Each structure stands twice: as C-alpha cells, then as structure tokens.
C-alpha cells in the first residue's frame, strides 16, 4: 500500500464532509478544495504497489505461474500458512452498505466510498495496516453477511462501517459467529473504547469509582449501546446506568420504540425524561444531537460531573456552556477544536494491529478493555516534546487532557502489545507473541517519522500566524496556495499582483469569493514605494544601477517588490519562484538581501520516500563548492534538520568511499569532514562515501570504523548539478515527495519554489517559511 503524505494533506481531517459541515470545522475547507483533494494527483486516496520485484521473467515466474503453485499447495495443506505466504495477516477490509454515512444518512454503497477509502488510509497511516474498502450494494442483512463471509479467506480482519441500527447489530453478531477472523463495527466499539479510556481518567481525577457512579446515556443507537455495554463489562452496575432515547428513559415495561438491544439495558425506575435522569448523575454520555443537554441539567448533576458530549459535528452541550455552569465539570467532545477529543482513530488501528499480529480469531471485550486501559495509562504519562510542538501547547494529565492525542508517536508501540496480550490471555490468538520486547521494537519501526514531523511543522505554522507574501499573484497555482494558506488558519496571505488580474484568475479557479479574504498588494496601491526605492538605491548604486533602474526594479519586478516588503516588515515571510528559474529568482532576491554563497546562503531539498526523510544540499546556491564551502553547507543543512525535528547525521557523498577509487575530483569530499573536525561541530558526520554506504546500514557494516550511528539523513553532494540530478531522479523514478529547495542562511524567511511546483508544493514552502526553517 502506498500512502504519500504531504504537509498540505495533513490539513484535511474532514475532507469527505459536505460544505455546510466543513464550515463548522476549526480549519475552513471549501467544497472545491475537498473535491480537488480527492481528484489530484489521481482520483481517490490510495493505490496498490508490489512489495516484490516484478521486472524480469524470473520475477514473474515466481510471482505467478509456475512458482505460485508451491505456496498454493502449502496453504491448501495447512491453511495457517496463508499468514506466512500472503498478505492476509496484514490486510483488513473496510466494509459498508452506506446506510448511515458520517451522520449524513443513507447515501448508498457508492456514496459511502470516499469515507471507506479514508478509513483505509487511516489504518495505514496510524498502524501500518493495509486495508481495502468494499462497498456492498444491499440493505438486506442476509445478503450482506453472505457476501462478507464468502470473502473471509482474503482478509485478516473485517472493519464494518456506517451501517444503520439495528441492522448493524444483527450483521456484526452473525459475522462474529460465522467467521474465524476479527469482525469489528467501529461505529459501535471504536467510540466505546475511547470513551471508556477517557472516563477511566476522568473518574481518577474526580476520585470516583465506576461501580459507584450513576451514568446517564443519551442516544441508544449503535455507539451508545456499545459504550454502555463496555462500561458494564468494566464494572459499571446495571442499575446505575440510565439509557435514554428520543422517547425518554428506557425503563422496564416500556413498549414504545423498543427493540431487543434497548431492552437489555432497561432498568426498574420511575424516571421518565432525560432531565429527570440527569439529577445527581456522575457521568453523562451523549451520542445524540446538538443541544440535547441544557444548563439546568448540568447544574443538577453531582459534584465533579463528567460530561462526554460526543454528538457530531456539534456536541449536546459545548465545553464553554458546561463550564459556565459547573467549573468542576470534566468535558469531552468528538471535536478536534476542543480538549479531550473522543477520536476513534485512537482505537481501531491499534486494536487491529494487535489482533493481526497474533492472528486472532476475534476482537473480544478483554482486548477492547486492554486498549482502553492502555490509552488511559498513556495519558497519565509525560507527553513527548514533539507532541507538544505539534499541538502548540504543553500537554499534561488533568481535566483538559484525559485522552492521548491522535498524533502521539507512542500509540503504535504501546496499544497493540496490550491488545495482543489480552488476546493471548483469552485464547483467541493463533500465533502468540513470544518476545514482547522485540515486538514493541518492531512496532516502533513501523511508525512513519515523516508524518509526525510534517504535522509538527503544520502546527508550528498555525501558531506563528505569519503574514505570508506570495510574490507571483498572476499565477493560478500561487493564488490557490495563498487562499488555502489563509483559509487553513495559518495566517494572512498577502498577494503581489494587479487587483483585476487576481480577481479574474480567482474566479476562473472557482475561488471568486476569496478576493474579499486575501490582501492584494502592488506598487500602485502601496504607500511605501518611495521608501523601498531609497533602500534599494542605497544597496545597488555602486553596482551599476542608477535611480531610474532601481525604480523600475522596485515597481515592476514582483520578486524584488515582495523582497522589499519583507525587508521593511510589511510581511513576515516570502514565497516566490513558481514562475521563474530559481537561480534567476535568487539573483533578484539578492538585490535586497545577502542571499548568496559569499554570505552563507545554502539550498537544502527534503526528499520524503517510504517513511524516510533525507535532506540533500546544496541544491540552489553553490555551483562547485570547495571543502570549506562543503563544511558550511553541512552546518546549514544540520540546522534545517533540527528545525524540522531530525537529529542530523551528515554524509559527504561521492562516487568513492574513504579514498577508493582515488580521484582528484573526490578530494574535496575527502577533506570536508576534516573541516568539521577543526570546527568541532555537535552533530554526526562522515565521508567521503557512496550513497549506498551513507543510507544502508548493511553497507555501513563493511566499514566498522565509520562514525555514523545510523543511516545518514543529510547528503552533502559535490556540486549543484549532482544535487539537481539526484533529487529530480528520486522524484521522477521513485515517486519521492520533494520539498524545497529550502533557502537557509538568509536573515529573513524566504523560500523559493521550483517552476514545476503544484499549488500544494507552494503551500508546503509557505509552511516552511512560516516556521522559519532555515
């Protein structure tokens, strides 16, 4: 499974919602953007790629006929070997009939496909579980179950999604009975697990025990019933749990609107309304509708009330409203823009990861409870710095942090082991894990480091709220990037261009309303032009420019004008270069800033591929650096690495390794490490070496004296042409995501795009500029 993550794509947490729902999100996302996200670069959200070589005739003979006959016969004789010789053991089907899509109702099987694709990529992103979406065009539970059961041999687990109640109960129960792999309805149990985790910690803070608490649930659908059932499995008493639906309290003897799943939670009580039930309640769980809980209800609850208002997109009562009435309340919602988000992505990827790794026959209550308890325990521990950086604030266990955040890197190696152990203890494991420590280390290696780094940059940019100058306002790609930058809440977009031209091109791009949001700046409408000219003349008057030349540069060249804006504090950062060659743009910028090799400027390009980030330098400034220049490049690149969250490991790469073969052309790469030896830098470096020795730990073993403790993440290359060749080759042949070149070593934050940049690429560079990377 190939999942390419870029900075821009991390902004879309609700890309499948309609525009009226999107407007409610913290980040404003338009319908046009959501559709473009699903259309580009190819339709949909994922693709399949081979994990074995498929280039020669021998490869094909092994992959298909005749070689494939051998594992086929082995599996036919021993079915358990399917986990060894096929992808079954790491493949989950996300299956829906589209009868209850995201709270949007019955959109049908095809209408649900964008959501199911999204669920599949979440499996891959968070737990490295391969997943395929399957949409079944039937509302008949029998036909649905038969179809899923017949596909069972293909998969290691089944994730049911967006199926309306009560059919979802029937389908899940029947498939659990008929299949020998985990069947999990996330709308029910995913919400229940995260709710339980948060509740364990909320009760810890309030000093209460679950068996003593009066719990009120409003919403007796799939998620609500699953929540109350799991809490009862964890010790909540049946008689203390009051369940309400649209007709009021579910009590013993009630007949209206009842079914067998509601009846199982009926209690002997005189209470008839939600308002009556809420009096002296310790816990409220809401999976119902906006506004279901009133101020009077909250006021009537017991001391230190716990309120989980999980209705989406708007909770039963907002945290602000609840805290205005009860300062002692602990509040959670389903939204990302409030503390304590009950987010299913904290559960289902890791539940399946643990279940798949023991070849489980089922996901049982004990495994769900183990997941909840592990999540609760994780929230009570110190939060890593990278998580705090990503969210722009220090997180610590307390009333506003009772559930881990979805981007906590510890989730992948903390939750699956707990799930796997519970599965082994309860006898559902076909292949128990013997070395649990080794298993945890293996899980750590599955984590894609690029995603957390990019998420952190995105959050830092949002916190910076930089006024971003987009120099090329006559280009539609730049305009789309500028609009997205501002609508994403990253800061203010300042576009250099003519008003009528910008307006026309925005309208052509379907973004006509954005002309009122972004600020268009040019020489005609600024009051600072004379100041700009004076400054520029003072810099260029001894470089062959008269005042008339300088005026034309300042007034007519958008790259120079944008640079002058930045120099005078009329913007916080600059993105340019999408319409002209980077070397030419750098010359223009250099009229205003000292952005050249003599003053220490360096270009660093980030390559993202297969979960790795490698920086290549210099890709912009130095044409043919000497060994001293190479030392400067290494130091600048190390600074960029640390800015984005990497601990630098520099390799000076060449066609030779440690002096062989001998070549005058490689001599400077041999001398560059000695330059850093003299300078006493505080990062790892080594060279000269070939790229395979730099990046491959196995190749490094042949040189036990070399000083790198792992694969290099910075490659310092001999010349700009070799940097250009290597980065473009990786982009075109390997499909690497390329960010840069990142301009480092300049007093102000300036990033220069390449002429082939997409709107997403330009936005990525704006985010780097906002973070002042470089």
Image: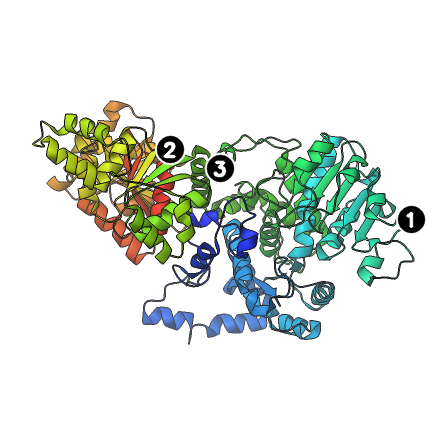
Q: In this rendering, is residue 7 above or below 85?
A: above
**Residue drawn at point x = 66 percent, y = 63 percent:** 163
Residue under numbered circle 3: 390
Give the mark nearest the N terminus, 1 or 3: 1
Callout 2 crowding tier (Cα within 10 Å): few <14, some 14–19, many ≥20: few
Residue 1 can be seen, yes or no:
no
Q: Is residue 650 left or right of residue 449?
A: left
Q: Earlier in the sequence, mark 1 or mark 2?
A: 1
Which of these two is toward me, 61 or 742? 742
Circle 3: element type: helix
Q: Is residue 695 left or right of residue 552?
A: right
Using the image as rendered, state which of residue 425 and residue 373 is in the foreground.
373
- Where, quadrant-wise, is the C terminus in this rendering? top left
* Camera-nearest label, 2 or 3: 3
Report which residue position mark 1 lands on.
269
SS state under label 2 = helix
- Among numbered discs 2 and 3, the one appearing first in the sequence: 3
Q: Which residue is mark 2?
A: 642
Which percent across, then down, holds residue 61? Answer: 38, 73
Residue pictured at 92% horizontal, 48% vertical: 270
Instruction: Give the mark toward the camera: 1 or 2.
Output: 1
Q: Label 1 to label 3, Cα distance in Å?
A: 48 Å
Badge 1 vs badge 3, beta-carbon distance below 8 Å: no
Compared to residue 179, the image places residue 426 above or below, namely above
Question: x, y (%) of residue 336?
Answer: 58, 43
Mark 1 or 3, closer to the camera: 1
Other residues around mark 3 within 10 Å, as few (<14) / some (14–19) / many (≥20): many
Q: Is 402 above or below relative to 451?
A: above
In the image, what residue occupies the spot 23% across and 45% down? 723
Is 80 located above or below residue 407 in the figure?
A: below
The residue carrying pointer 1 sits among few (fewer than 14), some (14 to 19) or many (20 or more) residues within 10 Å by Cα, namely few
């Amino acid at each position: 499974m190939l999942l390419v993550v870029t900075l821009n794509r991390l902004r879309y947490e609700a890309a499948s919602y309609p525009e009226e729902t999107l407007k409610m999100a913290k980040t404003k996302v338009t319908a046009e953007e959501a559709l473009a996200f699903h259309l580009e670069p190819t339709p949909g959200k994922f693709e399949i790629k081979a994990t074995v070589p498929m280039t020669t005739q021998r490869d094909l003979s092994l992959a298909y006929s005749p070689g494939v006959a051998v594992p086929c016969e082995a599996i036919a004789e021993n079915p358990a070997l399917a986990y060894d010789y096929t992808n079954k053991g790491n493949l989950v089907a996300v299956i829906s009939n589209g009868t209850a899509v995201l709270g949007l109702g019955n959109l049908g099987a095809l209408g649900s496909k964008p959501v199911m694709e999204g669920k599949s990529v979440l499996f891959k992103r968070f737990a490295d579980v391969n997943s395929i979406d399957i949409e079944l065009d039937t509302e008949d539970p029998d036909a649905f179950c038969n179809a899923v059961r017949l596909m069972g041999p293909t998969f290691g687990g089944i994730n049911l999604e967006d199926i309306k109640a009560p059919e979802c109960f029937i389908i899940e129960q029947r498939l659990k009975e008929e299949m020998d792999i985990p069947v999990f309805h996330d709308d029910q149990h995913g919400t229940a697990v995260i709710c339980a985790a948060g509740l364990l910690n909320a009760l810890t803070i309030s000093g209460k025990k679950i068996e003593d608490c009066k719990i009120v649930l409003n919403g007796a659908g799939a998620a609500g019933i699953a929540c109350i059932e799991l809490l009862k499995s964890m010790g909540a008493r049946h008689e203390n749990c009051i369940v309400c639906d649209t007709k009021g309290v579910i009590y013993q003897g009630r007949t209206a609107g009842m079914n067998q799943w509601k009846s199982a939670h009926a209690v002997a009580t005189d209470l008839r309304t939600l308002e009556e039930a809420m009096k002296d309640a310790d816990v409220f769980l809401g999976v119902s509708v906006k506004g279901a809980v009133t101020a009077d209800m909250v006021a009537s609850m017991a001391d230190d009330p716990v309120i989980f208002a999980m209705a989406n997109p708007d909770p039963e009562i907002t945290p602000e409203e609840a805290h205005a009435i009860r300062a002692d309340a602990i509040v959670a919602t389903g939204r990302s823009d409030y503390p304590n988000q009950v987010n299913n992505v904290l559960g289902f990827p890791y539940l399946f990861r643990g279940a798949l790794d023991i070849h489980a026959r089922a996901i049982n209550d004990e495994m769900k409870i183990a997941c909840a308890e592990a999540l609760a325990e994780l929230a009570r521990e110190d939060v890593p710095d990278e998580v705090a950086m990503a969210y722009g604030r220090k997180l610590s266990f307390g009333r506003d942090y009772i559930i881990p955040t979805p981007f906590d890197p510890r989730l992948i190696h903390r939750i699956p082991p707990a799930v796997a152990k519970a599965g082994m203890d309860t006898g559902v494991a076909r292949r128990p894990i013997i070395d649990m420590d080794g298993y945890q280390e293996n899980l750590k290696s599955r984590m894609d480091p690029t995603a957390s780094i990019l998420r952190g940059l995105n959050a830092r940019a949002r916190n910076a709220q930089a006024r971003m100058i987009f120099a090329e306002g006559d280009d539609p790609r730049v305009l789309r990037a500028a609009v997205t930058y501002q609508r994403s809440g990253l800061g203010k977009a300042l576009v250099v261009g003519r008003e009528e031209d910008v307006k026309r091109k925005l309208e052509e791009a379907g973004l006509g309303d954005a002309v009122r949001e972004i600020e268009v700046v040019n020489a005609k409408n600024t009051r600072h032009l004379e100041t700009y000219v004076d400054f520029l003349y003072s810099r260029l008057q001894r470089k062959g420019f008269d005042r008339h030349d300088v005026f034309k540069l300042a007034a007519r060249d958008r790259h120079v004008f944008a640079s002058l804006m930045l120099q005078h504090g009329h913007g916080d950062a600059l993105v340019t270069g999408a319409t002209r060659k980077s070397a030419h743009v750098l010359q223009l910028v250099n009229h205003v800033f000292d952005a050249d090799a003599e003053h220490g400027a360096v270009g660093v390009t980030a390559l993202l591929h297969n979960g790795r980030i490698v920086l290549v330098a210099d890709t912009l400034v130095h044409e043919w650096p000497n060994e001293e220049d190479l030392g400067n490049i290494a130091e600048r690149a190390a600074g960029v690495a640390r800015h984005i969250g990497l601990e630098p490991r520099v390799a000076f790469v060449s066609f030779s390794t440690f002096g062989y073969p001998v070549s005058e052309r490689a001599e400077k790469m041999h001398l560059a490490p000695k330059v850093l030896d003299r300078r006493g830098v505080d990062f790892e470096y080594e060279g000269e070496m070939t790229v395979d020795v730099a990046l491959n730990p196995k190749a490094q073993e042949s040189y036990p004296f070399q000083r790198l403790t792992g694969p290099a993440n910075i490659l310092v290359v001999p010349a700009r042409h070799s940097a250009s060749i290597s980065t473009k080759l990786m982009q075109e042949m390997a499909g690497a995501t390329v960010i840069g070149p990142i301009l480092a070593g300049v007093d102000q934050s300036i990033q220069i795009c390449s002429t082939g940049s997409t709107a997403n690429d330009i936005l990525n560079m704006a985010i780097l500029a906002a973070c002042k990377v470089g």
